[in-house]
Amino acid sequence: PGEPDGPRDALLLALWDRALAAASRGDALGAIDALDVLERRLPRGARVAYARARTLEALGRIRAARAEYGRAIELDDVPLRAFPSLNDAVRRIARDSDGIVLADLEAATTRRSDGAVPGLELFLDGCHVNRRGAAVLAEALAEALAAGGLVRLDPTWRTPFREGIARHLETTRIPSGVATSARRYLAWYYRVLQPDPDLGRRILDGEATLPALAAARAERRTLP
């Protein structure tokens, strides 16, 4: 369910439609009930796992949502980001090897995200960081390099760094042409890759500004 070439089983499709309908009217408990049944019938369904993760996040079950997002990535035949087992392998190699400095960017974005599930407060989409997300990555890199003895930082560096980022975000204006291109990309993204037609239309029409995306995410949770 949810895939153009997915199974045509009538019961599974009915459960998927029930989950979508429940989510669209804000009934996360009804959605999770249908998705739990689907997950038992399709234990390797990446889209079902992703839909469960989003619904668990909407219910405030953050730890369970994070685990389910990770499972969805592991099950995805074409993952668009590093999957959890790959990140774990990188951490293991860094821990067991000499001379390797690890900047754990996944952990950094998790620590600095609203609600502990990184989203539109740090990312433009499911892959690319926004300006605030780029600052989080830069800070994590600086911290790792300093901890590894590769650079020397003043002990108080973090406060002026964050203050400078805050000033940059408040005062720097994105050129109109760049903003228009970004809106077109995001409108396509939220219509095709991670369908949310209403948000995609609002972005394209200029009703939803780029800084307002995080607020839209917090206010509105729908299944893909």
Image: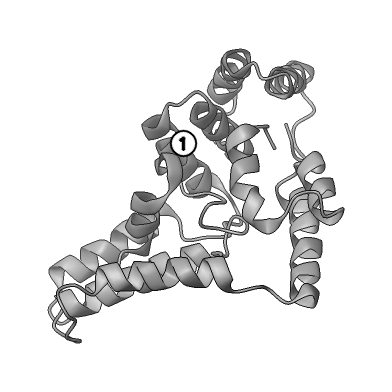
Residue 20 falls left or right of residue 166: right
The image shows residue 103, relative to residue 220, as above or below, that is: below
Please provide percent x and percent y for residue 23.
Answer: 68, 23
Amino acid type assigned to the residue bearing label 1 in the image:
Glu
Q: Nearer the viewer, residue 8 or 132?
A: 132
Say whether residue 51 is left or right of residue 64.
right
Question: Which of the colour schemes (rainbow, by chain, secondary structure, one colour) is used?
Answer: one colour
Residue 4 visible from this viewpoint:
no
Q: Secondary structure at mark 1?
A: helix
Residue occupying the point 65% across, 50% down = 212
The quadrant in which residue 158 appears is: bottom left
Location of the C terminus by quadrant is top right
> Residue 93's x, y, as percent?
23, 68
Question: Which residue is denoted by mark 1 in the rendering?
Answer: 68
**Picture quadrant of residue 175:** bottom right
From this view, report whether residue 152 is shown above or below residue 135.
below
Callout 1: 10 Å neighbours few (<14), some, many (20+)?
many
Query: Which is more toward the observer, 46 or 42?
Result: 46
Q: Residue at x 53, y 67 (%)?
A: 169
